[in-house]
Amino acid sequence: MTDKQWDLLNGLALAYIGDSAYEVFIRQHLLEKGWTKPNDLHKRATHYVSAKAQAALMHKMLELDGFLTEDEAVIYKRGRNAKSHTIAKNADVTTYRISTGFEAVMGYLHMTNQNDRLKELVDWCIKEVEDEK
């Protein structure tokens, strides 16, 4: 696929890769902060990567006028509206769908090599989560 074709992927495919891309940033961030014990890492990571956390971050992004680009907003909606055949373990359907949209945006940015923008969004997410504590 060419870069232009990545934006044609369905929302669930983008969310699949976006979940991993976002989690790698979070894991690296936690290690850089000095957390090294696996149990601590897992507990701390859930503050950033759970469906509930991602949905809350997405709500904040959507509240900020012009925060997401037009393309990112389209990808978010594609991910959010995708018909998944999996059931969320720890979230209601609405929260799960919003977090899928969040992951789709991350996946889109990753697959289109918009690395600076991806890092900008991830850094913003990290700051938001840590300001909540």
Image: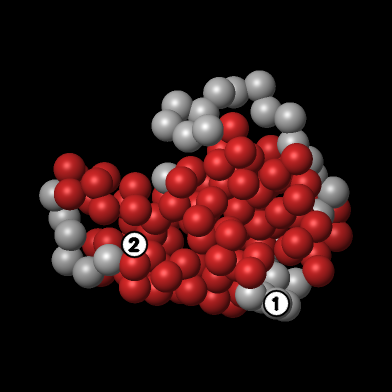
In the image: residue 22, left or right of residue 71: left
**118 relative to 14 in the view: left or right:** left
- Looking at the rendering, in which quadrant would you find the C terminus? bottom left
Q: Position of residue 82 (x, y in %)?
A: 74, 36
Which badge, 1 or 2, comes first in the chain's sequence?
2
Between the C-alphas of marks 1 and 2, the distance is: 30 Å
Report crowding for label 1: few under 14, some 14 to 19, many 20 or more residues within 10 A (C-alpha): few
Residue at (34%, 53%) from the top-left corner?
47
In this rendering, position of residue 85 left or right of residue 30: right
Q: Position of residue 68 (x, y in %)?
A: 69, 70
Name the residue beneath numbered marker 1. Answer: 65
The answer to whether residue 119 is above or below residue 59 is below
| Nearest to the observer: residue 133 or residue 12 | 133
Q: Residues within 10 Å of mark 2 (few under 14, many from 20)?
A: few
Which disc is residue 28 wearing? 2
Looking at the image, the residue that sits furthest to the left is 37
Q: Residue at x 48, y 43 (%)?
A: 51
Q: Is residue 32 visible?
A: yes
* Amino acid under disc 1: Asp
Labels in figure, total? 2
The image quadrant of residue 38 is top left
User: Where does the image place residue 96, in percent across and percent down from the top left?
Assistant: 56, 38
Q: Position of residue 129 (x, y in %)?
A: 38, 65
**Is label 1 in a helix, a strand or a loop?**
loop
Which is in the foreground here, disc 1 or disc 2? 1
Q: Residue at x 74, y 30 (%)?
A: 83
Give the residue drawn at x 59%, y 32%: 93
Tell me, yes or no, if residue 18 can be seen here. Answer: no
Residue type at the position of mark 2: Gln
Vertical arrangement, residue 15 with respect to residue 31, above or below: above
Badge 2 marks a residue whose secondary structure is helix
Q: How is the image coloured?
A: secondary structure
